[in-house]
Image: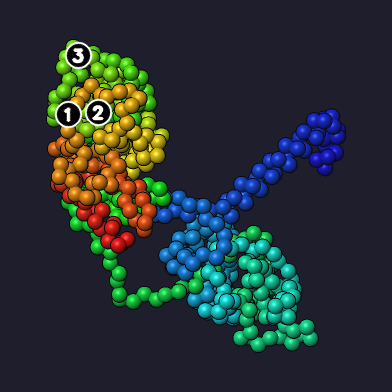
Amino acid sequence: MLKKFLQKQIPFSAAFLVILMVSALSAGLFFVFRNKIYQYQLYLVDSEKPSSIFNLEYGSLPKMSEESFFLRIKNQLISDKASFIEANLSEMELKFFDRGQETKKFKIIGKGLDGSWWETPAGIYKIETKEKVHFSSIGQVYMPYSMQFQGNFFIHGVPYYPDGRETNLNYTGGCIKLLTKDAREIFELSSLGIPVLVFEKDFQKDGFVHEVQAPKVSAQSYLAADLKNNFVFFEKNSSSVLPIASLTKLMTAVIATEYVNLEKEIEVTQAMLAPTSVPRLKIGQTYKAYDLLFPLMTESSNEAAQALSYFLGPQMFVELMNKKAESLDMESTVFADSSGISPVSAASAKNLFSLAKYLYFNRQFVLSLTNNSIDTSVYGAPKFSYLSNFNKPGNSSSIWKQFVGGKIGLTKASEQTIVSVFELELKNEKRPVAIIVLGSNNNFKDVEEIISRIKTFYE
């Protein structure tokens, strides 16, 4: 009918274009529909919201023996209004869900022997083939209403021999076996590609509890994690947004090095001076931007932060800091100034982990500035000499020999804070580990305690 209409109403070339568009639209709708049903993302959820995201792949999955994991996947399919099959090998029940609603339930009469090589594997699968009768070359039997979901594993009815005799109900090659009438019904309900969740609980709860002793620290919030693979060793309230004080200056250094010509000189004015631990700048003197980075990073100079912001204008500088934070997925971070004096400047430990990752892999010279290990061969020796380093304790323990860099902060609102990066020897390999501490009574002691607890797992 569409073809006749097109022949009457429009030339062939236009008709071809319309048909092409309709076909593309249909294919697009199918792709969206298919993705809606079969492409899922697994969220590793903490107490507040997803922290980390992974694409969920089909196949044997030992975690499907964990009831909480299985229920998370099942509930996700239900919320997506997907059609799927649930095979619960602990309850020996098979259920069919039509667009998120359970509509049918069948008794499983056979499964693979536990512990054998043909044990039915827990996992997330999909129906790959459908045959009204499938001949098993392994068992030399016919399997009615067979639906393959993984290699040699099928959902099917009661098998029978070539002479027509049915096998006994204990006969199994690892497949999920139903009564033949039930197998026919699920066969007719199912389509190719439909997900199959195979679950079997591999443990029972008892009263024994394994406890990992958390570090004994004073911090309100902390996070210790591997910068390469995001593995979290320890955390507490890591999503809580707290004042960060001079940790702000890490972002100040990033913006200064990305937007300011480090050879450019600036004359110090009264407006650039601010209360700071060790006053260094003199009104009327000129300094290169490069020179200002040293007191900024080692002595946490508020004056240096102010002076650097005047290259672009304080307001524009802070706007760039917040835009950079947004680009690094530091969604709850707010910078109110370039120094961190304002209690409005705040972030979570998770956000600061993102900043630490960026510094370690993309701007490691900023970390080197904080540790007095910067190579000065390009720009020459800095104008400032004999600077103190506030970022690690004066009488450093052996732990601080592994310190790559970081920054401390201290205000009345924030208490003591620190972002620190260490290269720790774990399993005979150096691993970059970020330790962020917020709202602490003793930031150095807290960092040392956390590292000590991490190392106990690898001794």
Looking at the image, tell me whether mark 3 or mark 1 is earlier in sequence order: 3
Mark 3 and mark 1 in contact? Answer it, CB < 8 Å. Answer: no
- Is residue 340 depicted above or below 417 in this figure? above
Q: Is residue 179 visible?
A: yes
Residue 406: image location, x then y, percent = 27, 39
- First of labels 1, 2 by sequence position: 2
Q: Earlier in the sequence, mark 2 or mark 3?
A: 3
Left or right of residue 211: residue 361: right
Task: Name the residue that disc number 1 marks.
Answer: 386
Quick one: quadrant of the C terminus? Answer: bottom left
Label 3: few (<14), some (14–19) or many (≥20) C-alpha neighbours in 10 Å: few
The dot on residue 285 is: 3
Q: Residue at x 19, y 26 (%)?
A: 385
Q: Amino acid at mark 1?
A: Tyr
Residue 227, image x and y in percent?
A: 37, 47
Q: Is residue 7 left or right of residue 135?
A: right
Tell me the amino acid under the disc marked 2: Phe
- Residue 46 spot, x, y in % from top left: 36, 54
Q: Nearer the viewer, mark 1 or mark 2?
A: 1
Q: Amino acid at mark 3?
A: Gln
Q: Quadrant of the N terminus?
A: top right
Task: Name the disc covering residue 294, or none.
Answer: 2
Q: CA distance from mark 1 to mark 2?
A: 11 Å
Looking at the picture, does residue 178 appear above or below residue 36? below
Q: Residue at x 40, y 76 (%)?
A: 204
